[in-house]
Image (tube, grey):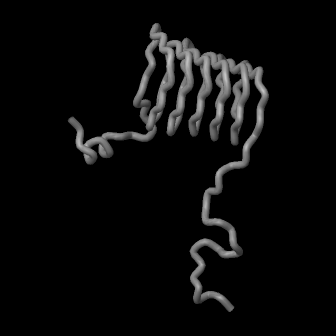
């Protein structure tokens, strides 16, 4: 068994932690703390904390919620993501709610698209410069 130190030590944030393999058909809801790759067929909703990749032979029929979604295969449903990347073999039908859209030539999107405001990246702007000390006031 892993203890928390081993789990954190071996956790590579760029690595795919969950794979739905080619030839596998899954029906249901998936929730994943890390990243996921779909090479098979998923009928249901997916909530992934980091990124999800739908491979060239992969398909998803359902809603996807993730920080980053990369599509090589087919998705039918609603995508809510920070970044959506549609590769040249990718195809999306449905709705997308995203901050950033990246498409390659040949990628297909038949969807209602809504761009959302990016999440704040720094301290809330209240007239202060980040890192400025209180002693610097006139």
Q: Taking 134 as reference, is 125 left or right?
A: right
Residue 127, quarter of picture: bottom right
Q: Position of residue 81 (x, y in %)?
A: 63, 37
Q: Position of residue 18 (x, y in %)?
A: 42, 27
Q: Report the residue at 44% width, 37% height from top.
A: 33
- Image quadrant containing the N terminus: top left
**Most extreme residue toward the top, as rendered?**
23
- In front here: 103 or 123? 123
Residue 113, quarter of picture: top right
How many numbered marks, from 0 up?
0
Residue 121, quarter of picture: bottom right
Q: Position of residue 16 (x, y in %)?
A: 43, 30
Q: Position of residue 108 (x, y in %)?
A: 73, 19
Q: Report the residue at 61% width, 17% height from top.
A: 61
Q: Report the residue at 58% width, 36% height from top.
A: 68
- In front here: 56 or 60? 60
**Most extreme residue toward the front, as rendered?**
28
Q: Report the residue at 31% width, 40% height from top.
A: 10
């Amino acid at each position: 068994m892993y203890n928390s130190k081993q789990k954190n030590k071996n956790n590579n944030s760029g690595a795919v932690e969950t794979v739905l393999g080619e030839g596998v058909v899954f029906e249901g809801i998936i929730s994943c703390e890390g990243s996921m790759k779909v090479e098979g067929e998923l009928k249901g909703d997916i909530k992934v904390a980091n990124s999800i990749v739908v491979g060239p032979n992969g398909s998803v029929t359902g809603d996807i919620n993730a920080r980053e979604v990369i599509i090589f295969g087919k998705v039918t449903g609603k995508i809510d993501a920070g970044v959506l990347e549609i590769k040249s073999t990718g195809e999306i039908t449905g709705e997308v709610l995203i901050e950033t859209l990246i498409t390659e030539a040949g990628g297909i999107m038949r969807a209602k698209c809504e761009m959302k405001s990016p999440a704040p990246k720094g301290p809330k702007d209240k007239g202060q410069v980040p890192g400025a000390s209180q002693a610097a006031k006139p």
